[in-house]
Image (cartoon, rainbow, N blue to C red):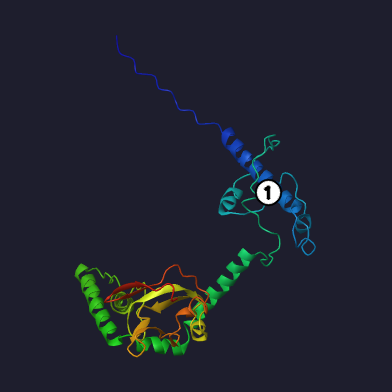
Amino acid sequence: MADRAPLRRKPVPPPAVEETWAKDLTNQFRQVLSTQRMNALSQRPSQSRSESPAPRELFAPRPSHAEPPLRHGYDYQTSTTSQPTSQKSPNSSLPPSYTSLRNIPLVPTPPTDAKSLRFKNMMHSLSNMPCKWENPGLLDEALASIPLERIYNEAQEESDIFQAEAESLGNGTRAAWGYQDCVIRALLKWFKRSFFEWVNNPKCSNCYAPTVAIGMAAPTPDEQARGANRVELYQCSNQEVYSVHKKRWVHVDACEEAWDNPRLYTEGWGKKLGYCIAFSADGAMDVTRRY
């Protein structure tokens, strides 16, 4: 008895009803979501309501079967497809409201609260900063501090290396970086390794002794002209010298040109000191009562 060949079932394609149902449900969801957003915006109290028209005045009435306006690229792709032949009534369980995520006013209004005003001022300040970089005087001053010959020589050497590597590959391969790119790379290396320095407490500009941070201070007119908004104030640690004539230590502040005025910081600046300890090569002493 000959073996029978196994029976094979021909695959049945899925019905097109599921695809039509999915498109229909998507359109209903968009319509309900758009209606909820417009209703929430029309009911929300606004300071500029007397100046701005109502949402219903901005949009003409649309029939219930029309598709909502395009908002995203996804809408553009789906709008080119054919519309379903039948419209189903929306489900009783409506989707959640997304107005809290898209709380956009109908008419742009300037900020009024303190937080928004600070953000606005910061944006204006940052927008004006790049314009100062085009100042010819500042550019000349910056170029005077840069070793241009060293930068150009290092850039030329690196550019030649990139060009040689590209020629070794053949087939008209371009270099990884050009000469102009190598100039910026050389400038970057010089700034990080030679010019720039991380500083916690800067040295005193007069005696080059270590300094101690004492808080923040208002910028001087010269510092404001250079774009400074907040200035850290440091005090030289060599604040006392020994007077042979008086046979005692004398307080000195070179930054303030103060002589024998130890209460300058507490009474003059209003600083609250917990302790004030004087250090020297001979030892340390608590001088809190003096200050």
- Image quadrant holding the N terminus, namely top left
Q: Residue at x 71, y 47 (%)?
A: 35
Q: Is residue 284 left or right of residue 15?
A: left
x, y (%) of residue 67? 68, 48
Image quadrant in which you'd find residue 161: bottom left
Q: Toward the viewer: 216 or 113?
A: 216
Note whether 80 is above or below 22 in the view shown: below
Viewer-nearest residue: 260 or 1: 260
Please tell me which residue is depicted at 62% across the width and 45% down the height of the picture.
Answer: 82
Task: Tell me if I can see residue 83 in this picture.
Answer: no
In the picture, measured across the screen, residue 126 lies left or right of residue 254, that is: right
Closer-to-camera residue (276/145): 276
Q: Is residue 160 found left or right of 290 in the rendered image? A: left
Q: Please tell me which residue is depicted at 52% across the width and 77% down the height of the picture.
A: 267
Quadrant location of residue 256? bottom left
Q: Secondary structure at mark 1?
A: helix
Camera sees residue 143:
yes
Q: The residue under label 1 is which amino acid type? A: Ser
The C terminus is located in which quarter? bottom left
Q: Give the answer, above or below, for where 21 lies relative to 9.
A: below
Residue 196 in picture, x, y percent from top left: 33, 77
Front-most of 28 and 56? 56
Residue topped by disc 1:
34
Q: Horizontal and vertical percent for residue 57?
A: 79, 57
Residue 205 at what x, y percent from top left?
36, 84
